[in-house]
Amino acid sequence: MKLVRFSVGSAADGAAQWGILDGTQVQVTRGMGGAPTGETLDSAGVTFLAPAEPSKIVCVGRNYLDHIRELGNDTGDLPKEPGIFLKGPNALAEPGGAVQRPDWTQNFHFEGELALVIGRRAQQLTPENALDAVAGYTCGLDLTARDLQKTDLQWFRAKAADRFCPLGPWLETEFDPRDVRVQTRVNGETRQDGRTSQMIFPVVDILVYLTRFVTLEPGDVVLTGTPEGVGALDAGDTVEVEVEGLGVLSTPIV
């Protein structure tokens, strides 16, 4: 199923609701993955929102070897553990929603990723039950002020500013994340093209690792890392992140 979070009318004016996207119709549900209410809406009359209501967005950095190399971080052995950083809920942006290029960075980058949203409270997950905690999968865009990432003590400004995490367009509940294509296009030109099978730490390993230390709550988002090919964005660009089987997340930069 395709789970969607939406508002009737504009994203700013309408209250957020959840539903199941079935062709051109949205069956309204009682929360994420909840039972249908019986109400059905035409998808043309709603605005899709970021399909998550997180307490936190947990991100994995340097999870593809070629991406590590392109940033010059391959001076030693491969990481022994996933590198983790956080974004707050303030970073979410809706699919198709514009993101303003910040005037406080000189090197504003895109990073397309596979993202997942947690469906139940998760602690001490095991390889056998880790994927049972996932409500669904979607496309994520990890926007980054690359110059500030290199200068700041932590990556808070560089990674977690307002609207630095576009997400969508929906959650796919039936999905195998082990070997799918992840592409990022800028103005129609393919800039990133990798597969999740190239991850140093696959999705299951990430979830098991995270829940040793942190409780993941329903609605929390996990970004799984980006393939090589990251680069700069300017006002007027349009970024598209496409994960095979999950649709396309489009973000205009203004």
Image (cartoon, helix red, strand yellow):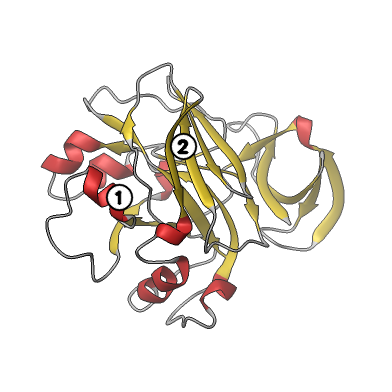
- Name the residue: 34% across, 55% down: 64
Q: CA distance from mark 2 to mark 1?
A: 15 Å
Badge 1 element: helix
Q: Amino acid at mark 2?
A: Thr
- Residue 71 point in image, percent of width and height: 21, 44
Quadrant containing the N terminus in the rendered view: bottom right
Residue 6 appearing in the image:
yes
Residue tagged 1: 66
Marks 2, 1: nearer the viewer: 1
Residue 120 appearing in the image:
no
**Tag shown at residue 184:** 2
- Residue 225 point in image, percent of width and height: 38, 53
Badge 2 element: strand
Say which label, 2 or 1, has the lower sequence index.
Answer: 1
Judge by depth and name the residue closer to the eye, 74 or 226: 74
- Residue 105 point in image, percent of width and height: 22, 28
Q: Amino acid at mark 1?
A: Asp
- Name the residue: 64% across, 29% down: 10
Q: Is 153 displayed left or right of 112 in the figure?
A: left
Disc 2: CA contacts within 10 A as few (<14), some (14-19) or many (>=20):
many
Count of numbered marks: 2
Q: Is residue 244 above or below residue 24?
A: below
> Which image quarter: residue 47?
top right
Disc 1: CA contacts within 10 A as few (<14), some (14-19) or many (>=20):
some
Residue extending farthest to the top is 236
Quadrant containing the C terminus in the rendered view: top left
Q: Is 224 displayed left or right of 128 in the figure?
A: left
